[in-house]
Each structure stands twice: as C-alpha cells, then as structure tokens.
Image (tube, rainbow, N blue to C red):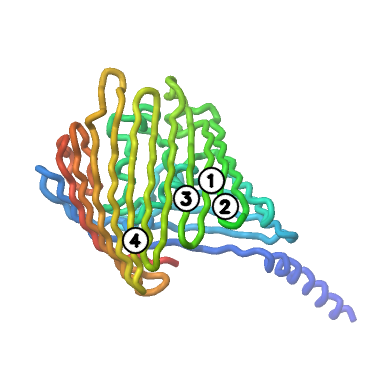
Amino acid sequence: MKPQILAASLAGIFLAPMTAQAQSNVTLFGIADAAVRYVDNQGLGSVSSLVSGSGSTSRIGFRGVEDLGGGLSAGFHLEHGLTLDDGTANSTSKFWDRRATVSVASKAIGEVRLGRDFVPSYRNWSRYDPFSYVGVARSSDFFSSSPTGPIRSAFGSNNNTTVRADNAVQYLLPKLGGIEGEVMIGLGEGGDATAGRAKLAGVRIGYATKAFGVSAASTQSENSLTTLGKFKDHVVGGNVKAGPVELSAAWRQMKYSTVKQTNLMLGAEATFGQHVVKASWHKVDMDGRVGATNVGANDATKLGLGYVYNMSKRTALYSSLARISNDGGARFAIPGGAAGLAAGTSSTGFEAGVLHRF
C-alpha cells in the first residue's frame, strides 16, 4: 500500500496547482507593423524611410485574468512598444511604456485599475480618429510639444498628460446598457515635470449603441512647471453608423493660462467585406499669448485618406496619404521628412505597409 499512498500524495501535489491555474488565463499578444514612408516638406525636398506602427503601433504584451468567483476577477496588463524597423524600444525611459496595470473587477460594480494607462481625454478623442492616432494621416501630429502653445507652456519638452498618466488610480463603470465611463486620479508624487510626474484628475462619460454614440471627457493636471494654473484638456465627440459607413466628429480643447489650442476633427470610415476606406479632416486653431508672443495666427489643417485590405483576421495591407497646410507661424509636419520646415508651408506624406496581429 505504501507505493499507492506515495503515488496519491504526488498526484495531489501536482494536481493542486493545476486546478488553481485552470481558473487563470495568461496571454502573450502583440502587433508587428512596418511601412515604407515618403514625406515631402515644401522647400526641403523628400525623404523615404521604413517606419514602424503606421497601421497600429507595434508592440508586445502580456495580460492575465484570474476568476475569483462570484463575478469577481483580478488581472494585469503589461504592454511594451516596439520600433520594428530597427528593433529598438519606443521609449528609452519606460519598458512598459504603453500600459502597466493591475486590477480587480466586478461584473456588477465595475473595475478598479492601478498603474500607467491612457487618460480619459485621450481615450475619448482617439476613438473618433479613423487612423487611430498613428501613421501619416494621424491626428497626433497636432498634439506635439514643439510649437509654442499650451502643451509646451505646461510641460516643456518633458512627458505630458495628453495621452497617458503614471501613478494612476482608475474606476471604470461596469456594462450598464449603453452607458460607459471612468474616473482617473493621478498621484503626482511631487509633480516633478522633468520626471514626467503630474497630479491629475479626469473623468469620461458616454452612451453608445450599434447605431450611434456620444461621449465627453475632461482631464486636468498640474506639475512643477504649471505655476499659472492647471493644464486643462476637454473632449466632446460622437459617431453615427449607417450600413457599412461610420461618420464621426470630435472637438478637443487644451488650455493653460492665457493660451489655448482647439482641435476639430471629422472622420469617415466605410467597410465593404475585406476592404476599408478611411478619410479625415483635422483643423487646429491656436489662440492667446505665451508671455509676449501671440500665437493666434499659427493654425493648420490636415487631410488624410487611407485604404486597408484585411487579408485575414490577423493580417492586413494598408496605405495612407496625408497633407498638412500651415498658416502664419505654424510649422506642423508629418514625421519622417527633412527638418527645418518653414512657417506657413506644407508637408505631404504617403505610406504603404503590412500589419500582423499575434
């Protein structure tokens, strides 16, 4: 009987962890995306390059969920951005630069999430961008800290809170019909702007069905550089779907002290089987003063067109064309072109690439 007792004991040792693991799920996931890009900056000639993440940001990540029973679950999400063209990381300072969170969720009550994640204003804006904030036609070219305006005034050239926040505590609503929303509090931990730290408060609320949606978000932050008040970031948007066509519109205004930047974006996306056609029009309007500098004339518009052919659920071919037209002292440019674009000139870009999800 002793061998049988020993065998039963060993089986118990090995099967116990397997039973516990059966309640958990850990997934390795990612996107590999690369494109050939051509950018022509007026008066400076053209530059051709191989770029990463023009259809969707190249990344690798791990996420896991454990079922705790009674409608409760615990989970984590770790995501690292990649530049596929040269194999380096997107960020030199943060390994899990895209997201690093741990959470506890209830189907009835909602989710509490801790760590680095998207701020409510960005989450609300990007959902209405047909190009998902990436590529030559992306809306993100107008949210740079390079021009004199509210972003540069509040953060300098340091990391800002227009996309993500560190040291954040979030509460996300459970599924309540079409109602959705979240609250985020960012713990400033001293608010050292050079370290990318900011005290933050944000909220998002919306209602969405298969036919239409509308939502609003507001995020406010402060750091060691915001001595004249808080940096404010407000977004309102909506979309409507009619058959294979989706139309969207979004308004976003960022303000710090006496300077503000107002963005208006109109988007369209049509899906016909494996084919997707996209278009967007985006205008940025600067207003106010930074010290003695009046930035009111430094405006720009951007037109983007795109096409995606979905070869499968995981793999797609895509191409995009975009043009930025600057006014006054504005120098907004599509990334990848020659440096030194003159004020009031244009920047044109085209790219074609392949995206694979795993």
Q: Is residue 47 left or right of residue 35?
A: left
As drawn, 265 above or below 196 = below
**Residue 139 visible in the picture:** yes
Question: Percent from the top left, x then y, of residue 284?
Answer: 29, 39
Disc 2/disc 4 C-alpha distance (Å): 24 Å
Instruction: Select label 3 or label 1 by which is in front.
Output: 3
The crowd level at tag 2 (other Cα within 10 Å; few <14, some 14-19, many 20+) is some
Mark found first going from the N terminus, 2 or 4: 2
Q: Is mark 4 on a helix, strand or loop?
A: strand
Question: Percent from the top left, x then y, of residue 140?
Answer: 33, 45
Q: Is mark 2 on a helix, strand or loop?
A: strand
Disc 3/disc 4 C-alpha distance (Å): 17 Å
Q: Residue at x 55, y 58 (%)?
A: 63
Disc 3/disc 1 C-alpha distance (Å): 9 Å
Q: Which quarter of the image is occupied by the N terminus?
A: bottom right
As drawn, 95 above or below 156 = below
Q: In which quarter of the image is residue 308?
A: bottom left
Can you identify the residue that label 4 sits on? 269
